[in-house]
Amino acid sequence: MRSAFDFAPFRRSTVGFDRLFDMLENNSFGQAQENYPPFDLLRVDDNHYRIELAVAGFNRDELDITSQQNVLIISGRKKEQEGDNYIHSGIANRSFERRFALADHIKVTGADLKDGLLSIDLVREIPESLKPKKIDISGGAKKEERSAIGGREEKPASEQTVDAESEAHPA
């Protein structure tokens, strides 16, 4: 299902955001989204984030966290317990699977389950090769740079005439 909003003007003026626009266009805004278990997204600081899911009734053995490429998958499978004679069961203990799309260079650093709240810590680690670099501006090309750029070094006029005479009259 396509959204009613046309992203074509934005596609023309941006480079490298195709994935973002594809996700926005293909997201089904009109369909009901799964909202179990409820979660919070927190920004701890500029490069650290946390996802908190309310998973009351689940223990560590019943939860699974998988990180692959740009997707974080959190799933919970409740173990069947025979012999429990509930008169009323109001705590949701159905199986679930939550998927979170992660941006490039986001890594999962840890997870903790405490008081029915699953906390997953994330960090953005940008490689050194992708970090901005300061480029110095020089007034003119140095002698070594000219030889590297042109492939051979230009000799001063006085040396050129000496070389030409020695080539014409070999010793």
Image (cartoon, helix red, strand yellow):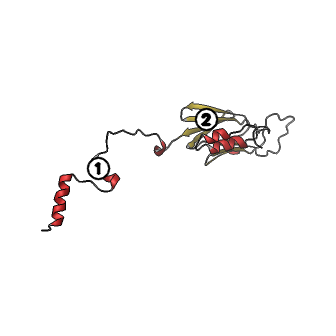
Q: Element at badge 2?
A: strand
Relative height, residue 73 to residue 116 (above, below): below
Residue 95 % position (x, y): 76, 43
Relative placement, left or right, of 70 versus 1 is left
* Residue type marked 1: Glu
Front: mark 2 or 1 = 1
> Which sits in the foreground, 150 or 34?
150
Residue 80 % position (x, y): 79, 46
Q: Element at badge 1?
A: helix
Residue 144's disc is 1
Write down the residue under mark 2. 50
- How far apart marks 2 and 1 lie (CA) works out to 51 Å
Residue 72 in which image quadrant: top right
Residue 157 % position (x, y): 20, 52
Residue extending farthest right? 87
* Residue type marked 2: Arg
Q: Earlier in the sequence, mark 2 or mark 1?
A: 2
At 79% from the left and 35% from the top, the residue drawn is 91
Determine crowd level at label 1: few under 14, some 14-19, many 20+ residues with C-alpha closer than 10 A. Answer: few
> Which sits in the foreground, 26 or 35?
26
Determine crowd level at label 2: few under 14, some 14-19, many 20+ residues with C-alpha closer than 10 A. Answer: many
